[in-house]
Amino acid sequence: MSTIVKKQTDIYELFSKLIQNQTLQHAYLFEGVAGTGKKEMALWIAKARFCPHYFEQNRPCGNCHQCQRIDTHQHPDIIEIKPDGLSIKVAQVRELKEEFSKSGVESKRKLFIIEDIEKMTQNAANSLLKFLEEPEGDTTALLITTAKQRLLPTILSRCQVIHFPVQPLEKRIKELEERGLTLSQASLTSRITHDADKAVSLANDETFQDTVKAVWNWFKLLAKQDEQAFVFVQTDLIGTVNDREAYQFVIDLLIIVYRDLLNLKYSDSVTLAFLNHESSIKQFADQLSSRKLITILEQLLEAKKKLNSNVAAQGVFEDIALQIAFR
């Protein structure tokens, strides 16, 4: 059974009925955070549309030539587009339109999937808009985004928007345990990403584990308001993390642990991210006031915005140390 059936049961059932009743619309926008199954659902729909055995069992068989070519991204009547570099360019949309102006290679049906559509240039978006307004033949468009607010309203109005909700934390942790992670690994990585594959990869990534250790050591200095927290940035932290993704992990991990501290103020049954340090976290929670924790979380969210605006990471981290450890 496809993992998407478990991950997004309601959406799976919706599209099963639409395909079974042959009432599928020509354009859908799948929106939600990364890891919620949007691409998996798009590929499942592609299989359902092209698998010759679908109506025999109300699901794609997964074994026929059509299903296998979709799995390997080699089906001639299914076009997948993703950003070329930092954006989806107008040339990519033109190529898509040229392909769809031709008859289907093996049937009259055609389907296209565009990932990260929010990264489409203005010209590309305008070109796609006209294509969505005047679909040709039996065409299905599946657009995928994690930032619906960045899309042109005119594109949104041409699509049926399907929101992919995040799975509950307990469910994500259980899934990761079933995939071989320890409870401690699952508790932490499930907070970093909603994508199970990414979580498993992080749990087995030595660089990420080094980052986690460095952040925990830094957090202890920050929580104690130790002035060495500022020096630690230069002597340890920057030497451990040295790329943009790692810089984001540092802020995200701090937000996670401080959020757990705040949650402990209101409940004793919090599933902690840093399970290996449960006793220390509970001790810190007793020492810090709710108001202080809220202020720190606001400062960390502001620091995250600075990182996203390309402010130098060392300066951002040093500022965090000044705000938390010296006040």
Image (cartoon, rainbow, N blue to C red):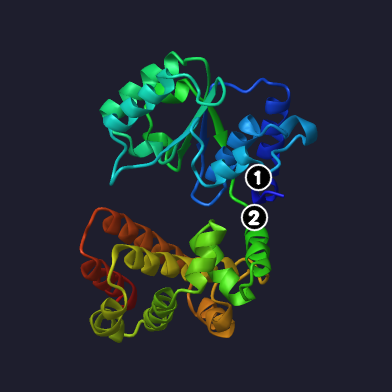
Of callouts 1 and 2, the N-terminal one: 1
Instruction: Decide which of 215, 93 is in the foreground and name it.
Output: 93
Q: Amino acid at mark 1?
A: Gln
Disc marking residue 168: 2
SS of the residue under disc 2: loop
Residue 262 seen in render = no
Q: Which quadrant would residue 210 be assigned to in this image?
A: bottom left
Instruction: Decide which of 96, 174 is in the foreground and name it.
Output: 96
Report the residue marked by disc 1.
Answer: 8
Residue at horizontal 23%, vertical 56%?
310
Disc marking residue 132: none
Which is in the foreground here, disc 1 or disc 2? 1
Rounded to the nearest angstrom, the CA distance separating label 1 from label 2 is 12 Å
- Placement of 106 over or under 283, stated as above or below: above
- Placement of 69 over or under 190, stated as above or below: above
Neighbours of disc 2 within 10 Å: few (<14), some (14-19), many (20+):
few
